[in-house]
């Protein structure tokens, strides 16, 4: 970071003017309501659902615009292809590690052994719906036709099919990249201008995050308070601890190799993690991550391609949940799955995990689809129905763990791949990790989170300095 940028660093804002503070207030109030008045708390879920519904409206356009700008602005499909291949290679390796870690945790802790509970009729009915939804999600051909390839250009936006939007964005970006430079520049500029309008919408929606956190947490505490089975508590704790091991050991090792601290990365995105805890959806913070990582020193091209792609292909928390949940169901039915069969199941889940795009509840549907696709004597329709019905009771608590782990995994992936591509300003990243307030001006400018009277010339100077740094990285002349 330049000396001018350091001198222009904005003063720390009062904590009560920042979004993360009000999200914490919402979470705390939700916990209190869930404990004191669980009946009333169960009626607040619509607040979180409404917020996620609004977020889902703009996730497709955000991915479409950012991927186009990230690829087409390069003007070099070979370079973009190299970036995509490295990202997919990293995602595949992370998926295998996460699935394996879930298998190891299930075999060591054995959370389902000794299970004696029975699901309620309401849980069985809900499980039947999840299984029916998962029926169409099994098999490689079904994955291609239902999840990957769009049926129309606008359909994926209407149906919130993130993976299909990504495919459309890549095709569109490739087409724009093949155009003459002047026309390509104008089209990329137009898409980038449209993205600013979308970010303006997000800026308004994010002020509803504290209400969403309140409703989501109140509902979660009220529902979880009624769960009395000790095995479910063991499963939940095992899952969260396994996610912690993945984040701080696996991702921590990768981060150390790349030259940064996982603890500082978590501190940098603490606001986003709090929002995820309140809403149980990592999609709610996707636009904020795009801005924050670019402001932290990763090139716009890398951020614009890796983050949206990671939301479909790098779901580390979901992978841990899939293998751990599958073996829990086996153990709860007093059965055992041979190691060879466990490996086969994990290999199948490498594919099925790509259909879950970070939406609340998608992990449960994917688990049902994976078990059905595996089939055989271990996962009869009756065993799947009962197992899914049992897990439903704590799925929202586990959904928060999935979303948090997915978010951290994608942030680390972006920074590592940016360094791998030599498109990471390490000095800028080091400064931001030491002092996260350095990205405050960019976050305020794009997403809000402070008061209007804090839009000072000092903030403008900081934002300009940050833009200058990222521009240098984008053209390959910045500090590496």
Image (spheres, grey):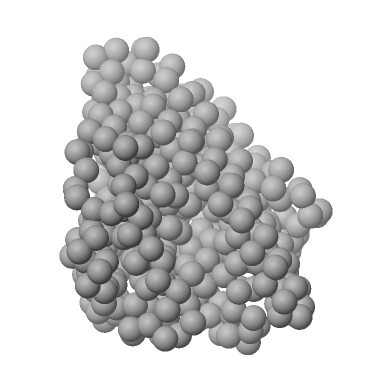
Q: For the point 37% across and 12% down, which residue is it?
A: 40
Say whether residue 34 is left or right of residue 381. Answer: left
Q: Is residue 43 above or below residue 100?
A: above
The answer to whether 230 appears left or right of 319 in the picture is: left
- What residue sits 44% from the left and 38% below the top? 206
Camera-side residue of 394 and 150: 150
Residue 155 placement (x, y as % from top left) = 76, 48
The quarter in which the C terminus is drawn is bottom left
Residue 288 visible at all:
yes
Q: Position of residue 214 (x, y in %)?
A: 34, 27
Q: Quadrant of residue 162?
A: bottom right
Between 446 and 136, the residue placed more toward the observer is 446
Q: Quadrant of the image for the N terminus?
A: bottom left
Q: Nearer the viewer, residue 478 or 178?
A: 478
Residue at (39% x, 27% y) in the render:
211
Residue 371 visible in rendering = no
């Amino acid at each position: 970071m330049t000396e001018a940028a350091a001198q222009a660093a904005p003063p720390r804002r009062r904590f009560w003017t920042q979004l993360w503070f009000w999200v914490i207030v919402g979470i705390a109030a939700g916990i209190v309501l869930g404990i004191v008045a669980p009946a009333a708390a169960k009626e607040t879920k619509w607040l979180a659902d409404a917020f996620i519904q609004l977020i889902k409206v703009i996730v497709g356009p955000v991915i479409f615009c950012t991927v186009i700008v990230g690829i087409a602005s390069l003007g070099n499909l070979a370079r973009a292809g190299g970036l995509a291949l490295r990202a997919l290679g990293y995602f595949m390796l992370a998926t295998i590690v996460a699935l394996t870690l879930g298998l190891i945790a299930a075999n060591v802790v054995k959370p389902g052994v000794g299970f004696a509970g029975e699901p309620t009729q309401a849980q069985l009915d809900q499980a039947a719906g999840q299984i029916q939804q998962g029926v169409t999600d099994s098999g490689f051909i079904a994955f291609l036709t239902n999840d990957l390839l769009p049926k129309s250009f606008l359909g994926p936006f209407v149906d919130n099919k993130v993976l299909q939007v990504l495919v459309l964005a890549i095709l569109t970006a490739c087409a724009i990249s093949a155009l003459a430079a002047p026309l390509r520049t104008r089209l990329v500029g137009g898409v980038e201008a449209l993205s600013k309008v979308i970010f303006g919408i997000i800026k308004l929606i994010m002020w509803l995050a504290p209400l969403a956190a309140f409703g989501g947490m109140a509902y979660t505490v009220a529902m979880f308070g009624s769960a009395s089975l000790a095995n479910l508590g063991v499963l939940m704790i095992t899952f969260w601890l396994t996610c912690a091991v993945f984040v701080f050991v696996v991702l921590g090792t990768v981060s150390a190799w790349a030259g940064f601290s996982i603890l500082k990365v978590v501190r940098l995105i603490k606001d986003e993690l709090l929002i995820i805890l309140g809403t149980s959806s990592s999609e709610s913070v996707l636009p904020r991550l795009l801005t924050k990582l670019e402001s932290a020193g990763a090139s716009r091209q890398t951020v614009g391609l890796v983050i949206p792609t990671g939301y479909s292909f790098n779901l580390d928390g979901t992978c841990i949940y899939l293998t751990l949940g599958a073996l829990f169901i086996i153990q709860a039915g007093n059965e055992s799955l041979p190691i060879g069969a466990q490996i086969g199941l994990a290999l199948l889940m490498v594919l099925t995990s790509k259909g879950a795009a970070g939406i609340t509840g998608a992990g449960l549907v994917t688990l049902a689809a994976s078990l059905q696709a595996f089939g055989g004597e271990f996962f009869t329709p009756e065993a799947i129905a009962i197992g899914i019905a049992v897990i439903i009771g704590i799925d929202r608590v586990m959904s928060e763990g999935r979303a948090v782990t997915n978010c951290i995994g994608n942030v680390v992936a972006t920074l590592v791949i940016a360094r791998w591509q030599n498109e990471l300003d390490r000095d800028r990243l080091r400064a931001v990790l030491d002092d996260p307030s350095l990205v405050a001006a960019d976050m305020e400018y794009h997403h809000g989170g402070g008061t209007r009277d804090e839009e000072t010339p000092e903030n403008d100077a900081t934002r300009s300095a940050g833009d200058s740094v990222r521009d240098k990285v984008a053209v390959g002349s910045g500090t590496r």
